[in-house]
Image: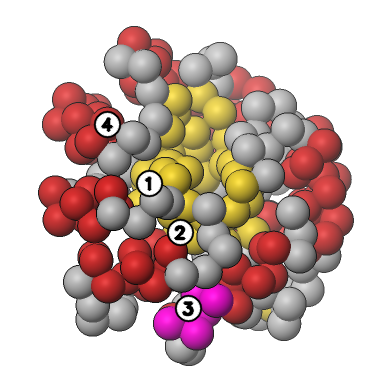
Amino acid sequence: MNTAIQLYTLRDVDETPNELLSRVAETSFDGVEFAGAPDAATVDAFDRTGLGAAAAHVAVDELEDRRGSVLEDCDDADCSTVVVPSLDESNFESRSAVESAADRLTAVGDAVADRGFRLAYHNHDHEFTDLGDTTGFELFAAAVGDTVSLELDVGWALAAGEDPAALLGRLDDVPLVHVKDVDADAGRPVELGEGDLDAEACADAARDAGAEWLVYEHDEPSDPLASVPDGAAALDALR
């Protein structure tokens, strides 16, 4: 499996795209996951690094309202996977809401596929609503069409009370896995290895599921720049 860092981890670092991406390229990460469609400056810096593009997180309304320009930006960075990073909690409150959300994502996935791109959905914890015999997330995963893949965030799944390794074994088409650690009691992200995540079990399950990328993300790093080499080393141990 390849490894990448979600650049949202570095959102508060006051450096140019060239400086940030150069930092990533100095580690063992194979690539990056963009937080938003990459702009021209980011693409220029990215082209000089030799890194790969795991995916780009792009809001669903942007993919609906300005899909052409978003996909052109992604294409400039040789990024063929776009990921919807979240849908509002209301989309998972009932079966009918989940089915409507799945239909919406499938329509976007179909349109993206027509342009030669792949669409995926990234979870948080609010998708795991109790719908009786299943959760909102698993109903959503079963209801989306073939043009929608999943990017399972194992940390947020754990925060929702799930066993993320077991969940990976039940899901189909998970090309990307977010490796994030959490303090499960507090429901907040922590540095990888300092929380309750069984990262090795998740990596094994991701490998068995055919995942292409393990993506490191820390939503609230106390030292974002230190998080880059630390995250790279942690994912190296899980390949």
Mark toward the start of the polypeptide (1 vs 4): 1
Residue flagged by tag 4: what amino acid is it? Answer: Asp
Using the image as rendered, state which of residue 99 and residue 10 is in the foreground: 10
Distance between mark 1 and mark 4 Cα atoms: 14 Å
Residue flagged by tag 1: what amino acid is it? Answer: His
Distance between mark 4 and mark 3 Cα atoms: 30 Å
Q: Quadrant of the N terminus?
A: top right
Residue at figure coordinates x 17%, y 25% from the top left: 68
Q: Which mark is residue 57?
A: 1
Using the image as rendered, state which of residue 207 and residue 27 is in the foreground: 27
Which residue is disc 3 drawn over?
A: 220
Q: Which residues are magenta?
A: 225-229
Residue at figure coordinates x 50%, y 74% from the top left: 228
Quarter-of-image position of residue 81: top left
Tell me whether circle 3 and circle 2 mark residues in contact (CB < 8 Å).
no
Tell me whether circle 2 and circle 1 mark residues in contact (CB < 8 Å).
yes
**Comparing marks 2 and 1, which lies closer to the viewer?**
2
Distance between mark 4 and mark 2 Cα atoms: 18 Å
The verdict on residue 156 being magenta is: no
The verdict on residue 227 being magenta is: yes
Tell me if residue 195 comes above or below residue 93 in the rendering. below
Tell me whether circle 4 and circle 2 mark residues in contact (CB < 8 Å).
no
Residue flagged by tag 3: what amino acid is it? Answer: Glu
Local secondary structure at mark 4 = helix
Residue flagged by tag 2: what amino acid is it? Answer: Gln
